[in-house]
Amino acid sequence: MIDADNIIATIESDPSRFDEHVGDLQTILESGETDARRSVAQLLGDVAEVDPQIGTRHPELLELAFDDENNIVRGLAVHAVAIITETAPEAGTAFVPHLATALADEELAGSAPISGIRTLGAIDRETNTSVSEADEALAALLRDAPVDVRETVAINLDDTVKAAPQEFPAMLRAFVGVLDDPRSMTRLRAAETLTTVAYEDVEALHDVDEVLAGLKKLRSDDDLSADRVEKMINITEVGAGYVEE
């Protein structure tokens, strides 16, 4: 029987020994008790702090953690990839599909959703890998998640959508829905994104008139600059072909 506690303690005291115990760690993730699997998933993040390339050398370990039946283990996998991506963005690109699946998981708890969102944003900014696979999951978060999660999506993925609007149809629709979000930053980022897309690629929008109606409601928004709102309305009307530039 594998002594999970001893193996984990050994690696924690000397992360350079991680590779020699990969087989045992995989066995624990495949068939160990829940507490042991959680400990290994936490260990992956701890080791990634000093050796972010473990995700490249041993992706099977993180894949097992992402597929675990326990939502805490899955959340720890998200955090581990976030740590990897922070210092080695290219090493995190292989896990975009896993992050997309994790963010669609309603059981994903704690700070894991926010961590996953920020990681996708970082991958988009720092690498050439598309994160469009997460379009539906991110849109669902914009529609249904708590306000802090919605704001995190808006702040971290607005430029992503502006740069490739045709790849994010679900998010574009969801941005329309948060033009009346309780948080002013979410409203602003949504408005700016939709305005940019209307001007540069209006055909990517499902309904430009719906966008305009939402923007015009922002005229009564005390938290946003009235001049800024009017400018966004004008730019959107130009993009829609309703007025000349």
Image (spheres, rainbow, N blue to C red):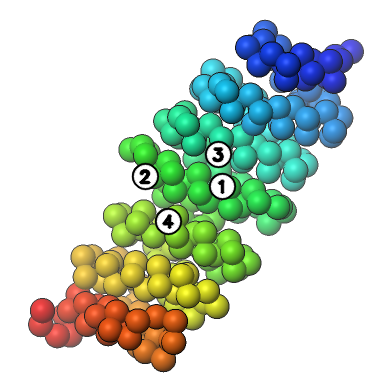
52 above or below 198? Answer: above
The numbered mark, 4 or 3, whose residue comes first in the sequence reads 3
What residue is pinned by disc 2? 125
| Distance from the alpha carbon under mark 4 to that under mark 2 | 9 Å
The numbered mark, 1 or 4, whose residue comes first in the sequence reads 1
What residue is pinned by disc 4? 157
The numbered mark, 3 or 1, whose residue comes first in the sequence reads 3
- Residue 111: x and y in percent read 66, 51
- Asked if disc 3 and disc 1 are in contact, CB closer than 8 Å, the reply is yes
Label drawn at residue 116: 1
- Residue 148: x and y in percent read 59, 64
What residue is pinned by disc 3? 82
Please tell me how crowded label 3 is: few (under 14), some (14-19), or many (20+) other residues with Cα within 10 Å: many
39 above or below 107? Answer: above
Please tell me how crowded label 4 is: few (under 14), some (14-19), or many (20+) other residues with Cα within 10 Å: many
The numbered mark, 3 or 2, whose residue comes first in the sequence reads 3
* Residue positioned most to the top: 20
Please tell me how crowded label 2 is: few (under 14), some (14-19), or many (20+) other residues with Cα within 10 Å: some
Amino acid type at circle 1 is Gly
Q: Quadrant of the C terminus?
A: bottom left
| Distance from the alpha carbon under mark 1 to that under mark 4 | 12 Å
